[in-house]
Structure formats: C-alpha cells, structure tokens
Image (cartoon, rainbow, N blue to C red):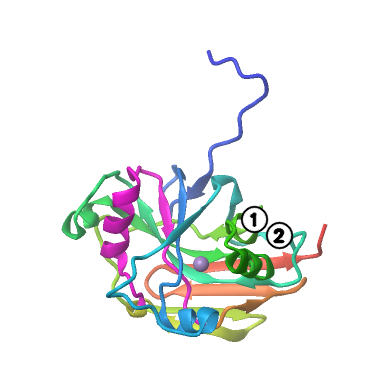
Amino acid sequence: MSNYLFPPPAVAALPIRGQSELFPVNRLFFVGRNYHAHAVEMVGKEVDKANERAFYFTKAPSSLTLSGATIPYPPETQNYHYEMELVVVLGKGGFRVSQEQADDLIYGYACGLDMTRRDLQLVAREKGRPWDLGKDIEDGSICSEIVPMPGKVIESGKIALTVNGETRQNSDVNKLIWNIREIIADLSLYYHLQPGDIIYTGTPEGVGPVKAGDVLSGEVEGVGTVALTIGQPE
Ligand code: MN
C-alpha cells in the first residue's frame, strides 16, 4: 500500500467512443506552426520545411478538460485565443520509429482546442522566454472523446471552428506541413513515446480572441466535434 503525504492527483483520462473504459492520458504534446497560413498570420511567412524541423511544446496533463465544459476566462490575459486542432492518440509506445512504423502507434483521434494566452505567448516569443504561461493554462487543453481508429493515418478532412455560430477557422488537415506519420516519427527522436501520449497537431489560420459568454464549436471531418463555453473570470 502506497503511503503518500496527501492524495496524489487523479490520472487524466478521456472517454472512448463506444467503450466503457476510460483512456488514461500520459503526456500532451503540441506541434507549433503546422499550417502555412497560420504561420503567416503568426510570423508573417510560410514555414521553410526543407530547412526547418518541426517544433513542439507540452502542457501538463492537468490542463486537460473534456469537451462540453464551461471554463472561466483565465487570469492574467487580455487576449485569450482558440486554436482548433486534430489530436492524434497513441495506444503504443516507440523510440526512433520510422514513418512506416508510426502507423502502429496510432490508437485513434480526437478533436481538441489548444487554448492560448496570446498576449503572454507573444511576450515570451519576443523575449526568448518559455511559452508555459502562454500555453500551459489550467483548463486550457480541451479534448473530445477519443474515436478508436487503430493504425489509421488521417490524411485529409475538413477542420473548422465556429464561435457563436460564425465560422472562424475552416481548412483541411491535408494542409498539415508535417503530416501524422512525420510528426510521430520525429517526436520519437526526442522522446520514448508511451501509450497514452496525445499529440495536438497544430491549428489552421483564423485564430482569434474569445470573451465571456462565447460558445465554441469545432469539428474534424471523420472524427467528431469539440465544444467549449467561456465563462466569467474568477
Ligand atoms: Mn496549437
């Protein structure tokens, strides 16, 4: 019997479509600038894939919040943004896997929102500081139920987001700069990937601010939907 000073935090977990078991979540990885049009709106130019590697950031599993929630507008920001993303869910681990081997790690997919304190992220970027305060936000990683699709590589499909019924993001996952196989293989060069790791694959263009009372609704064709309501600040 373990003997902790106080109760350890609960395991982060997500429901699985069609199953009663929960999916235990290990780590949350996020790909930065993975659609050219989003790179242009963020830094004014497309990504030079021939000369740049993908880059990543992480958020704590405790930032994970299930789709459908109402979350308070977070503290210490005046510019809280949505980023609609396809989430890849790993059911197996691997280290230095090839793109061909990457398929085998895939358990399924989900729809996610990578919520961002844009004002703090931009200050961090400008000053060469870590992105944590801009990105690793309590209730800032929204995720839908997981849809099992073992070994399937999603190569195309509409990805879109509305705020209060108005379309704000509308693209296709075939515009990912680094595709699903490339992301898994590349990330496995840095990390011993584990079952339960989930990867937010990046957002298309059209990111923007939210305010209290806003209702967000996102979809990825062939996967599902994600929803979020922004509440009053605490
Ligand atoms: Mn993102």
Magenta stretch contains residue 48: no
- Relative image position of residue 81 (x, y in whole percent): 64, 72
The kind of residue on which mark 1 rests is Ile
- Relative image position of residue 50 (x, y in whole percent): 27, 75
Question: Which residue is at the front of the view, 204 or 72?
Answer: 204
- Relative image position of residue 86 (x, y in whole percent): 43, 67
Q: Residues within 10 Å of mark 1 (few under 14, many from 20)?
A: many
Residue sitting at 50 percent across and 85 percent down? 44
* Residue 220 against residue 68 in the figure, above or below: below
Q: Is residue 184 left or right of residue 87?
A: left
Q: Residues within 10 Å of mark 2 (few under 14, many from 20)?
A: some
Residue sitting at 44 percent across and 59 percent down? 56
- Relative image position of residue 172 (x, y in whole percent): 39, 81
Residue sitting at 32 percent across and 79 percent down? 174
The magenta-colored residue range is 176-205
* Residue 1 against residue 170 in the figure, above or below: above
Q: What secondary structure is found at the residue carrying circle 1?
A: loop
Q: Which residue is mark 2?
A: 71
Q: Nearer the viewer, mark 1 or mark 2?
A: 1
* Residue 212 against residue 150 in the figure, above or below: below
Q: Quadrant of the C terminus?
A: bottom right
Q: What secondary structure is found at the residue carrying circle 2?
A: strand
Q: Which residue is mark 1?
A: 137
The kind of residue on which mark 2 rests is Ile
